Image (cartoon, helix red, strand yellow):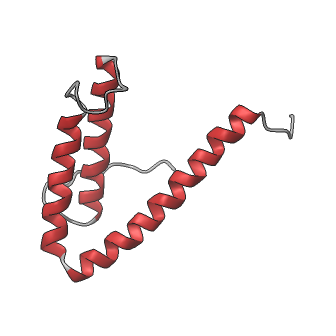
Amino acid sequence: MNDQLTPERSEILLLRARIVALERAVDAALELVLMIKPKELEAFLESRRKDLSEGYLDVEFAADLKAPEEREFLAREVERLMRALQADMDFKGGIASPEDG
């Protein structure tokens, strides 16, 4: 097995690491807000979930997405991920989803 990473694979792995680090930082911030203002956080997350999952279906939102299949994919994924976040916080409307790292 080759121990060298291609530049393309390195870029993908760096992006993955950045996303994981960002997710953990956001989780910490959300936990703090959950302790301080749980009802406001629940309403905010529900609002953002709806706005984003519906937004990706609108051709004027994220104009760089030209293919309807990409828009539908992103809308489904945002819906799934936001509902999983809501479930992790025991909020109404949350749907558990396994995390695969």
Q: Residue 9 location in percent, x, y?
A: 70, 35
- Residue 91 vs 68, above or below: the answer is below
Q: Residue 60 location in percent, x, y?
A: 22, 28
Q: Residue at x 46, y 67 (%)?
A: 25
Q: Is residue 28 left or right of residue 6?
A: left
Q: Residue 6 location in percent, x, y?
A: 78, 33
- Residue 17 vs 13, above or below: the answer is below
Q: In which quadrant will I find the N terminus?
A: top right
Q: Residue at x 17, y 36 (%)?
A: 54
Q: Is residue 17 left or right of residue 3?
A: left
Quadrant housing residue 91 = bottom left
Residue lying at the far bottom in this picture: please name it.
36
Q: Residue at x 21, y 28 (%)?
A: 57
Instruction: Tell me how many marks there are.
Output: 0
- Residue 35 vs 50, above or below: the answer is below
Q: Residue at x 32, y 19 (%)?
A: 69
- Residue 76 vs 100, above or below: the answer is above
Quadrant housing residue 80 = top left
Q: Is residue 24 left or right of residue 5?
A: left
Q: Residue 10 location in percent, x, y?
A: 71, 41
